[in-house]
Amino acid sequence: MIRKHFAGFAASALALAVSAQAFAGTVTTDGADIVVKTKGGLEVATTDKAFAFKIGGRVQADYSTFDGLYTVNGDNADAAYFRRAFLEVGGTMFTDWKYQINYDLSHNSGGSDKASDGYFDEASLAYTGFGPLVIKVGRFDPDFGLEKATSSKWVTAPERNIGYDLMEWVNSHDGGLGVQLSGSVADSVYGSAGITAKDANDSDGDSTKQFNARVVFAPLHADGNVLHFGANFARRDADVASYESRFRTRMGMRGVSTDGGNSAGDNGNRVSVGSNFTAENAWDNDTAWGLEAAWAMGPFSLQGEYMTRKLKADTAIADREAKGGYLQAAYTITGEPRIYKLGKFDAIKPANKQIGAWEVFYRYDDFTVEDDNVTVATATRAVGDVDLKTHNLGVNWYANEAVRISATYVKAKADGVINSAAAGDDSGDGFVVRAQYAF
């Protein structure tokens, strides 16, 4: 006999028990009936939805080749790596408590200090009993931006826009813990606010504190009929030693520098557009703003974001700023709409099980970085603003609801910065293919 609470706290044992009982043809309980689902992972839940347990995950295997700006010598290089390899465990306890644990076995999304081990991408607990408000605590990425809100399983291009590189702290937990309050109204309004204590201490041992806020208004919010607007804000302390102030970006090509797996090695060029002042008193705070908008009609979707970042100096050095945005258009040739959930886009589910769903897309990124600390031209940096542009043209094949194959061509250009005095390239070409299995 399997008790109701046992389904919530010992689901692995429950799954074995269910399998054993299946040979006898029956499964009985002294409480709510139990439902077992195997489509998209293994899920065990009580019919009253008071307890649930699900095991899932995602594997993304990438191969990329690139040249020009993407390499130090300008010649062609390639990389093969697991972009993500997540094991995901989540569920419900006592109706109002939700938990989620995601562990990344690929090492690729963590920092370089995590390259030899996997790491917890998320380990959080949420209370929903004050609905529609949700209180969430633990390790999870702060809320900032439409592309980040969309799961990496279903984001359109293989890498998100380069603005997230230039201000990557805004939606990264950096190994810390946080608390977030979020809620929605009538499927049209969503808001969140949270504080994260990050793993970067000042000389007194105090952790770096970061505040995030996001608000979304979606007057149209049905699949294939979306009108979405949003605004974002993030601010964090920067008065710590060795603060990362370089404003770096891989320009849409992860293979130039990966934290786990094969990369271009020393010949990979991760573009850095700002000098790195690392003294504890060099900087005061780091602030980012963002606006987002999206529109979808049937199989066509259009979305974009505008972002700004200002790193405020606390000494005689000048402030550093970045601003810009992206615009993306996508069309599903086979006619399926992109699923929309308040505040984010989700998967495309193939209507035809034989041919799957086919999507084509184009994204243009354009960001400018201003660094007045550069007063003399060098072999790799001109005086004045740096303008970074990428063109992403690709196709996604959703073979079924679990398997996705992608191919994307990326054209990058960086006015005001070059990769080396020898090569002299300020533009580059890259191509990346991905095989994904999400369960």
Image (cartoon, helix red, strand yellow):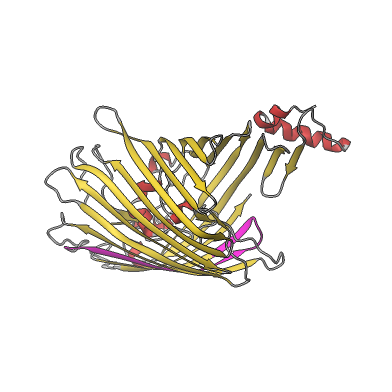
Relative to residue 88, is residue 362 depicted above or below? below
Q: Is residue 406 left or right of residue 19?
A: left
Q: Residue at x 30, y 56 (%)?
A: 308
Location of residue 69 in the rendering, given as x and y in whole percent from the top left corner: 33, 65
Q: Is residue 266 above or below residue 225?
A: above
Q: Can residue 40 be seen by looking at this rendering?
A: yes
Q: Position of residue 307 (x, y in %)?
A: 33, 57
The image quadrant that residue 5 belongs to is: top right
Q: Is residue 401 left or right of residue 99?
A: right
Q: Is residue 109 visible?
A: no
At a point 28% along the width and 48% down the height, the residue shown is 287
Magenta span: predominant SS is: strand
Q: Is residue 126 magenta?
A: no
Query: Residue 81: horizontal and vertical position, in percent?
Result: 50, 53
Magenta stretch: give its range: 383-406
Residue at x 82%, y 32% (from the top left corner)? 28
